Structure formats: C-alpha cells, structure tokens
C-alpha cells in the first residue's frame, strides 16, 4: 500500500538480481478480489528475512562453540607436547606429522575450501592424529626402555 495515497500496488522484480523493475498500481476491483493477500505476502517476506537472520545467528553460534572446543583441544595437545618435550623425546616423524596437521587444519578452516576438499582434509587429519598418537606412544615406550 502506498503510504500517501493508500492505493495498493505491485512490484515487479528481476529474479536474477532481486532489484525492482517496475511498480504497478492495482485497480480497486483487483484489490478487493485479492483480499488480505498483499498484507499476507508482506508478512511472509518479513518472516523469510527473520528466518534467514536466525540461520545466520545459528551458524555464528555453532562456529563459536566449535572455536571454544578447538581451544580446549589445542590446550590438551599443547600440554601433552610440552610433557613429551620435557621428557626429551625427539623424533623427526612427530615434527612432520605436526606440520602436516597444522597445514591441513589451516586449509580446512579456509572459507575458500570446497566441500569435497574438506572431506579429504578431514580424513587426512584423522589419520595424521592417529599416527601422531601412535608415534608418541612408541617414542615414550622406547625412551622408558632405554
């Protein structure tokens, strides 16, 4: 409805760009036939915008939650690594695995990484963490035996 005249009008939008192309004032007979449809369409559009904003907030909360989890996990890994370094455990394999994990993690969190690459990186990270864990365990056992 036009604010000044109270007339009902329609907006023709470009589907590709979403920009308004034309405005058409509807005749009173057409307006009466439409009933509450214009108001309901406006409410539907507003609800769609609210829904999109809620989805955006949900994604932000999920990323924040994941970040907090990652911080705690990194704290654990860092503590474990410091303990091992304190025990003078050194191995080139561990360094390579840690570098690989670091590099793959950075690529995984990059916004430009495609979904299929994320799946591949997740698999590599899981394997690298498994190998790192096994390698550290073997080094600890060997250092205790020596």
Image: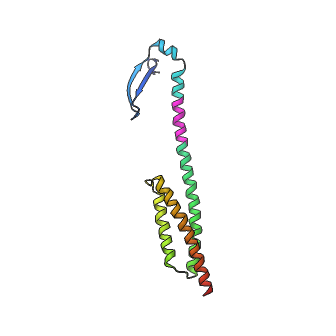
Which residue occupies the extreme bottom position in the image?
A: 146
* Total residue callouts: 0
| Left or right for 18, reference 59 | left
| Left or right for 26, reference 43 | left
As displayed, is residue 66 above or below residue 130? Answer: above
Q: Magenta stretch mostly in which secondary structure? A: helix
Q: Which residue is drawn at the image coordinates 42% and 25% (left, top)?
A: 11
Q: How is the image coloured?
A: rainbow
Q: Which residue is drawn at the image coordinates 52% and 64% (left, top)?
A: 125
As displayed, is residue 21 above or below residue 101? Answer: above
x and y percent of residue 116 in the render? 47, 54
Range covered by the magenta-colored residues = 44-54
| Left or right for 76, reference 25 | right
Residue 15 location, quadrant: top left
Residue 99 included in the magenta stretch of the image? no
| Left or right for 96, reference 143 | left
Which of 88/93 is in front? 93
Q: Which residue is drawn at the image coordinates 55% and 79% (left, top)?
A: 85
Which residue occupies the extreme left position in the image?
A: 21
x and y percent of residue 7 in the render? 45, 17
Tell me the quadrant of the picture where the C terminus can be found: bottom right
Residue 132 location, quadrant: bottom right
x and y percent of residue 29 in the render? 48, 11
Residue 48 included in the magenta stretch of the image? yes
As displayed, is residue 102 above or below residue 30? Answer: below
x and y percent of residue 107 in the render? 45, 60
Which of 110/83 is in front? 110
């Amino acid at each position: 409805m036009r604010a000044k005249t109270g007339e009902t009008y329609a907006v023709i939008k470009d589907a590709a760009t979403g920009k308004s192309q034309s405005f058409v004032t509807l005749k009173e007979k057409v307006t009466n036939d439409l009933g509450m449809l214009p108001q309901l369409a406006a409410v539907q559009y507003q609800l769609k915008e609210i829904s999109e904003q809620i989805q955006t907030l949900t994604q932000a909360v999920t990323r924040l939650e994941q970040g907090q989890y990652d911080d705690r996990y990194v704290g654990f890994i860092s503590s474990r690594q410091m303990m091992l370094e304190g025990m003078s455990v050194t191995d080139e394999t561990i360094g390579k695995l840690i570098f690989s994990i670091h590099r793959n993690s950075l690529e995984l969190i990059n916004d430009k990484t495609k979904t299929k690459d994320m799946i591949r990186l997740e698999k590599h990270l899981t394997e690298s963490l498994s190998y790192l864990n096994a390698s550290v365990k073997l080094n600890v056992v060997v250092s205790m035996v020596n």
